[in-house]
Image: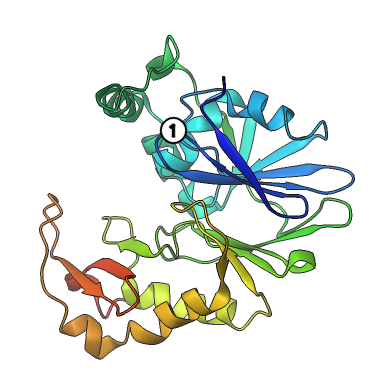
Amino acid sequence: MSIFHANEVLPGVYHIQDPMGVCMTLLTGTRKALLVDTGYGLENVQAFARTLTDLPVQVVITHAHHDHAAGSVWFDRVFLCEADLLHYALYTDQAHRERVQQQAQSNGIAAPEGYASMPAAEALPLDSCEIDLGGMTARILPCPGHTPGSCVIEVPERKLLLTGDNWNPCTWAFFPETPGVSALKKNMQPVLALPFEHVLCSHQPHLYPREKIDFFYQNITDEALAAAPAIDMGWPIDTHRLDLSDGQYIVFDMAKLTQED
């Protein structure tokens, strides 16, 4: 039995959750399919995608963190924004996969034999910002925020936005490579001007209305961020947490509050 769970949230749009709780999205057109992110890779995600479509599958990674990119081990090559290529090499290395394996085992999840030493797929820089899947278009929009090479993906035919980790109801913007919360806000503004109606994020299995992300970005004001209390995330970083009234929150590096590049 597969350890993945897939839900067709819109026609031809499958939101897939892996056993560690992270999500990826399979977009299926009439000519090809696009898998957005690969999860932790604790099971063969390529084989699972084949249970949903027999179309050729291309893979795009929204950013290089291991919970999105470690599953690349099941593919020959993946594409991501050039600014995250170095981070991809770091977050898919053996040390990170050993930590994933230990975390999985502590949750009663078995990793495949040899998981920690499996070679990551070749990572290539995105050479196109628009992929025609046949009746469905994936517009890949570089959007530095969660990482320097983060991207979001618009699917205009479904009025859909895939946010990667540039928005989740709980958004983390404190990693050492994160440009800073001000950069995240600035770079998301053109995205929020797009005419999408639905949102999929990487750490929830649900389809959200766009009002959810609009509320988030309207309320993480500079004044609210400056007043956010400190929180210990176990990192040597000045992390603070801003809680919003609808249950959303953002954790960010206060030292980068005014940093925009």
- What residue occupies the far top of the structure in this picture? 113
**Numbered label tally:** 1
- What residue occupies the far bottom of the structure in this picture? 223
Query: Is any atom of residue 236 visible in this view?
Result: yes
**Residue 56 image-quadrant placement:** top right
Q: Is 94 left, or right, of 191 in this rendering?
A: left
Residue 248 on image: x %, y % = 34, 70
Query: The C terminus lies in which quarter of the figure?
Result: bottom left
**Residue 171 image-quadrant placement:** bottom left
Residue at (10, 69) in percent of width and height: 230
Query: Is any atom of residue 76 visible in this view?
Result: no
Callout 1: SS: loop
Residue 134 on image: x %, y % = 88, 52
Residue at (29, 76) in percent of width and height: 259
Residue 148 on image: x %, y % = 43, 59
Amino acid found under the numbered disc labelled 1: Pro
Q: How is the image coloured?
A: rainbow
Q: Is 59 left, or right, of 203 in this rendering?
A: right
| Residue 245 or residue 24, whichever sits in front | 245
| Residue 142 or residue 229, whichever sits in front | 229
Q: Is 192 left, or right, of 249 in this rendering?
A: right
Q: Is 66 rendered above or below residue 169? A: above
| Residue 239 or residue 64, whichever sits in front | 239
Q: Is 29 rendered above or below residue 57? A: below
Residue at (50, 56) in percent of width and height: 164
Query: The N terminus lies in which quarter of the figure?
Result: top right
| Residue 194 or residue 11, whichever sits in front | 11
**Residue 142 image-quadrant placement:** bottom right
Residue 69 on image: x %, y % = 48, 38
Mark 1, other Cα within 10 Å: few <14 / some 14–19 / many ≥20: some
Residue at (49, 20) in percent of width and height: 119
Q: Which residue is mark 1?
A: 19
